[in-house]
Image (cartoon, coloured by chain):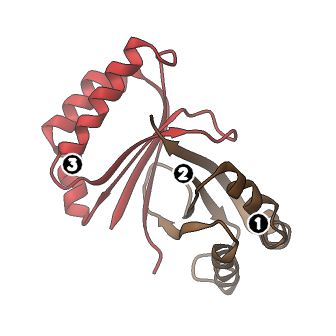
Chain colours: A brown, B red
């Protein structure tokens, strides 16, 4: 199991139309083959400056790679992510043996 | 639901005795009342410099506060965390409404 997480902050004000369009678009990543346990979350801790989190799991590294290269993912990155995300950090987890 | 996560890096070399003692100690936090879905994880992404992750969930903010103030937690922080963690980031999540 690989858990891929991204914590991020948007260029859009809270509760704006731009934020809504972005969040609706990001939810569609859940339909890409191999994506399991998809979660779009609110970041509520006071010890960092991010507002949202994304978490999903893949059974294998191959499934994760398939997601990364899937045209729906690359189109999302090009159309939304690189333009509308102000700051982010990717953190990936695997079980500790 | 509040998911409390911490991604961190230790002062200890990989597979050292010091690392093992630390990881054994951190696992005991799972026994503190209110802690649910406790996970100790390996951070495997290449886009940050952390090695481990901790994830746990609380049903309420009160349960989370109870964990923070629990003597087993404060003793762990004093005895292990502040001495043996080189770098860390706390990220907390709640469901997005």
Label 3 vs label 1: CA separation? 36 Å
Residue in front for this viewpoint, A59 or B16: A59
Where residue B85 appears, as percent x and y from the top left, is: 43, 25
Residue in front for this viewpoint, B49 or A19: B49
Q: Please, what secondary structure does the residue beneath circle 2 have?
A: loop
Circle 2 or circle 1, nearest the eye: 2
- CB under 8 Å between discs 2 and 1: no
Up-down relation of residue A79 to residue A90 (above or below): below
Up-down relation of residue B75 to residue A86 (above or below): above
Residue in front for this viewpoint, A96 or B78: A96
Q: Quadrant of residue A72?
A: bottom right
- Identity of the residue furthest to the top in this view: B17
Residue behind mark 1: A81
Is residue B20 found left or right of A79 in the rendered image? left
Q: Please, what secondary structure does the residue beneath circle 3 have?
A: helix
Q: Please, what secondary structure does the residue beneath circle 1 have?
A: helix
Residue behind mark 3: B67
Is residue A9 found left or right of B34 in the rendered image? right
The chain letter under disc 2 is A
Q: Are marks 2 and 1 on the same chain?
A: yes
Residue behind mark 2: A1
Label 3 vs label 2: CA separation? 28 Å
Mark earlier in primary sequence (2, 1): 2
Where residue A12 appears, as percent x and y from the top left, is: 68, 74
Query: Looking at the image, how many numbered discs can be counted on the residues?
Result: 3
Label 2 vs label 1: CA separation? 25 Å
Label drawn at residue A13:
none
Residue sitting at x 29%, y 36%: B27
Q: Quadrant of residue B92?
A: bottom left
Residue sitting at x 55%, y 64%: A51
């Amino acid at each position: 199991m690989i858990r891929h997480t991204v914590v991020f902050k948007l260029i859009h004000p809270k509760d704006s139309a731009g934020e809504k369009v972005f969040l609706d678009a990001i939810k569609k990543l859940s339909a890409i083959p191999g994506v399991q346990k998809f979660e779009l979350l609110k970041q509520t801790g006071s010890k960092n400056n991010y507002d949202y989190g994304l978490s999903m799991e893949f059974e294998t590294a191959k499934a994760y790679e398939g997601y990364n290269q899937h045209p729906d993912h690359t189109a999302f990155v090009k159309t939304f992510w690189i333009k509308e995300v102000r700051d982010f950090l990717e953190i990936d987890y695997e079980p500790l043996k």
